[in-house]
Image (cartoon, rainbow, N blue to C red):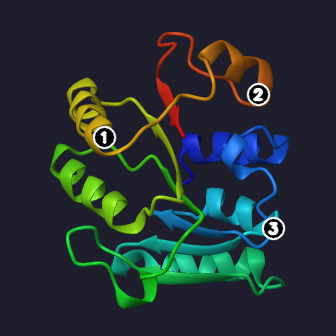
Amino acid sequence: VVWEVSVIVARLLALDVIPCCKDVIGRRVLELGAGCCLSGMALALHGAEVTFTDIPELVPHLEANVQKNLSHLPNWNVVAYDWLRPLPVKLQYRYDIIIATDCVYHAHLVEPFLTALKTVCTPTSTLLLVYERRDAQVIRDFEAQLKRSFKYKKPFSSKRLRELLGDELILREDDADWLTILE
């Protein structure tokens, strides 16, 4: 399943409007909870060195998808990472950008996800979080805890997203805040 949020991020990357993702050639990117890897693949196509991660049982899917789409590029790898376990040695690097799309949806994963973010982020890392606001309480808890550890801003209003995306991707009209982009 390709989540709508990943499609939106890929389109915004193609438009070159995400401030932290301009000029990514040679920059090290870690994608947490990569799923189908769409956001990370968009960054790799722009020259970033991307490490895709997800739970161990999804790694074969990630490898197959990235191999099928990026086999012509040398700048990627796939590593199993379950946020409920310690950070794998293969991920103990400094990353310029950490990206996570649609990783905030279950209450029991909020704390492990925040711990993972704190573990992989350095003072020089930029964190790009994009998520659908599915469960209001989960999002409130996540954002309250996020504020204690990270400074962040929302780079786009819903109006600006509609201007950027036009008719290519229709944002839901019933909830102007359904999508959150934090940088």
Residue sitting at the far left = 108
Image quarter (top left, top right, bottom left or bottom right) of the C terminus: top right
- Name the residue at 67% across, 47% down: 20
Left or right: 37, with 143 as reference point: right
Q: CA distance from mark 1 to mark 2?
A: 28 Å
Mark 1 residue element: helix
Q: Nearer the viewer, mark 1 or mark 2?
A: 1
Task: Check the image and report above or below for 164 versus 11.
Answer: above
Left or right: 164, with 158 as reference point: right
- Name the residue at 76% across, 27% down: 165
Mark 1 surroundings: few (<14), some (14-19) or many (≥20) residues within 10 A: some
Mark 3 residue element: loop
Q: Label 2: which residue?
A: 165
Q: Nearer the viewer, mark 2 or mark 3?
A: 3
**Front residue of 15 and 96:** 96
Q: Earlier in the sequence, mark 1 or mark 3?
A: 3
The residue under label 2 is which amino acid type? Leu
Asked whether residue 160 appears in the rendered view, the answer is yes
Name the mark on residue 25.
Answer: 3
Left or right: 11, with 138 as reference point: right
Left or right: 117, with 171 as reference point: left
The residue under label 3 is which amino acid type? Ile
Name the mark on residue 146.
Answer: 1
Residue sitting at the far front = 123
The residue under label 1 is which amino acid type? Leu
